[in-house]
Image (cartoon, grey):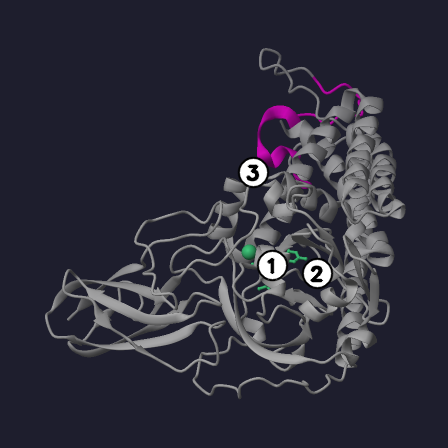
């Protein structure tokens, strides 16, 4: 076993050196061309929906670091195996490590946003790794521990001049240690030293390249941040209702949930950015960011939520958006008869299909450029994203958009629809208890039960709370600017009876429909069911 350590280590170091080189080159060329990002993206696209659901539900925003971590672990295991393979089959090992580079290049080239140069980092990773392995492998093999002297021949002397390390294979950990009592032969020691020096050099180079890549990458984000800071937001032509002052009504940008497939946040330069409106239109349009800022702007409060949100879950937020109404832009382009889907294309390669009807029916569907008074944060779609009140994000809220193509639902399935999710994605009525928390211990007395409820564009007409099996109680609804936002509700519970109690909430939407009790998983078109939690009154 011990004799495999150095070969495995040489495989690991060779791969690490290659990956660090690739990261460095990718940071200079394009962050999306990193083989780790490309392979990660390929894995995300190929992951079966239930697994993806599980990952989002279980790991939340940590799903991405976890994915990259897993890929690194798999690569490390493969690299160690290749290092061991190099002991007896050097050529095969070099080919295998080169092949890993080709896999990375294939992943990079098949990404939806691929450019030919994206293959470069992965190809370099393969070549550098193979070169490093070719250099390290002989050194790792110079001093393989010999078989331990057979116990039957305790007297057998170490053959003089052997370049092996006597007794190193005996199984005693100390024996192989640098200060082990069984001293290495001079040649064995020299071999080990040359391996350690080489390994140290590769480790150092890897750390330097990796560190430099991280610094360059950060400066790239900085450039996008600077472009964002340089934007002066125009005042809205139509400012909408005045902002609400109720705490918690708006979700601060830094707390706003984030769900997307982008392993690196796209960095779109607004000065280079254009939006194409093409497909089934009479007059295709191309707009620059400045063109967009010159359009009449509306300001609206709109709640956004994710179809993957579980009952009681966190993937919902409310913000004040500033943007260009989409309907007039579409009308100017002249939507042709039969076009029922707007396919948004985005810088992360995704496609999001929005029903034309929802955009043209008078609701405030917009191309948003600001969120809560700030240009869109990079993670939330800078410079321009769509917001469609009443639709889940995966059908109505494409971030980092670059093109809108008028099309039909029968001729094109967008990204999530290809993966089995519903095509039109209207939000379902939902309600959530934010206070008290599940399993809270509450002193007897009046307990304020509070939360939010949403049914964007239909609105919420009532929220009811039930304690155990007692009659449903009307919660008080706080004011809202429109039907497009969540509604904050509170109800004072006279919690007098000590013991365990079940709290339940349900909402009634603006059409009078009661939120269904029927439990449904998020897949394929949104979770349903009443949130229920248990608390103890003491
Ligand atoms: N370009 C792009 N836009 C996207 C997505 C994405 O993966 N890529 N995810 C969508 C989903 S599923 C949701 S719920 C919302 C989330 O928007 P947020 O991250 O700003 O909250 O963005 C939508 N727009
Ligand atoms: Mo979503």
Residue extending furthest left?
Answer: 497
Q: Main secondary structure of the magenta part?
A: loop
Which residue, given by chain and number where applicable, does mark 1 sit on? Answer: 357
**Disc 2 or disc 3, which is closer to the eye?**
3
Question: Are the residues flagged by discs 2 and 3 in contact, CB closer than 8 Å?
Answer: no
**Disc 2 or disc 1, which is closer to the eye?**
1
Mark 3 lies on a secondary structure that is: loop
Q: Does the magenta stretch include residue 158?
A: yes
Q: Does the magenta stretch include residue 458?
A: no
Q: Which comes sooner in the sequence, label 2 or label 1?
A: 2
Q: Does the residue labelled 2 lie within 8 Å of ligand 1?
A: no
Q: Where is residue 374 drawn, in percent x and y?
A: 66, 80
- Front residue of 290/66: it is 290
Which residue, given by chain and number where applicable, does mark 3 sit on? Answer: 48
Q: Can residue 161 be seen in this view?
A: no
Kindly identify the residue that appears in the image at 53 percent across and 88 percent down. 242
Q: Is residue 324 found left or right of 125 in the rendered image?
A: left
Q: Is mark 3 within 8 Å of ligand 1?
A: no
């Amino acid at each position: 076993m011990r004799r495999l350590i150095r070969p495995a280590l040489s495989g690991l170091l060779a791969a690490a050196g290659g990956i660090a080189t690739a990261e460095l080159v990718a940071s200079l060329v394009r962050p999306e061309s990193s083989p780790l990002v490309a392979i990660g993206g390929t894995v995300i696209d190929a992951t079966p929906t239930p697994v993806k659901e599980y990952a989002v539900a279980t790991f939340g925003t940590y799903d991405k670091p976890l994915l990259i971590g897993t890929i690194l672990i798999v690569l490390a295991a493969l690299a160690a195996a290749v290092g061991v393979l190099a002991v007896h089959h050097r050529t095969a090992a070099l080919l295998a490590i080169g092949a890993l580079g080709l896999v990375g290049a294939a992943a990079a080239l098949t990404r939806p946003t691929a450019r030919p140069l994206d293959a470069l980092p992965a190809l370099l990773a393969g070549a550098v790794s193979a070169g490093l392995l070719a250099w390290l492998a002989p050194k790792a093999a110079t001093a393989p521990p010999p078989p331990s002297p057979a116990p039957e021949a305790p007297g057998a002397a170490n053959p003089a001049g052997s370049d092996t390390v006597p007794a190193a294979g005996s199984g005693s950990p100390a024996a192989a240690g640098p200060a082990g009592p069984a001293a290495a032969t001079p040649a064995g020691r020299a071999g080990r030293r040359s391996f350690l020096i080489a390994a140290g050099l590769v480790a150092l180079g890897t750390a330097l390249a990796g560190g430099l890549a991280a610094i360059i990458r950060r400066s790239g984000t900085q450039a996008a941040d600077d472009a964002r800071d340089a934007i002066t937001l125009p005042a809205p032509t139509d400012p909408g209702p005045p902002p609400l002052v109720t705490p918690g009504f708006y979700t601060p940008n830094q707390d706003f949930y984030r769900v997307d497939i982008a392993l690196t946040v796209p960095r779109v330069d607004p000065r280079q950015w254009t939006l194409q409106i093409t497909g089934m239109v009479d007059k295709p349009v191309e707009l620059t960011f400045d063109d967009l800022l010159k359009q009449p702007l509306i300001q609206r409060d709109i709640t956004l939520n994710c179809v993957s949100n579980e009952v009681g879950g966190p993937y919902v937020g409310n913000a004040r958006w500033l943007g260009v109404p989409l309907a007039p832009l579409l009308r100017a382009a002249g939507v042709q008869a039969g076009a029922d889907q707007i396919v948004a294309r985005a810088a992360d390669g995704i496609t999001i299909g929005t029903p034309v009807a929802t955009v043209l029916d008078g609701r405030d569907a917009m191309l948003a450029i600001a969120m809560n008074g700030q240009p869109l944060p990079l993670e939330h779609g800078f410079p321009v994203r769509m917001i469609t009140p009443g639709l889940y994000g995966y059908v109505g809220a494409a971030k980092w958009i670059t093109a809108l193509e008028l099309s039909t639902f029968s001729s094109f399935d967008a990204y999530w629809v290809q993966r089995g999710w519903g095509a039109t994605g209207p939000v379902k009525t939902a309600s959530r208890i934010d206070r008290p928390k599940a399993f809270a211990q509450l002193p007897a007395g009046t307990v304020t039960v509070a939360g939010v409820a949403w049914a964007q564009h239909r609105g919420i007409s009532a929220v009811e709370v039930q304690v155990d099996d007692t009659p449903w109680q009307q919660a008080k609804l706080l004011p809202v600017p429109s039907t497009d936002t969540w509604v904050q509700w509170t109800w004072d519970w006279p919690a007098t009876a000590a013991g365990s109690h079940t709290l339940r909430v349900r909402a009634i939407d603006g059409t009078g429909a009661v939120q269904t009790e029927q439990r449904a998983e998020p897949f394929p078109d949104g979770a349903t069911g009443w949130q229920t939690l248990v608390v103890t009154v003491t």
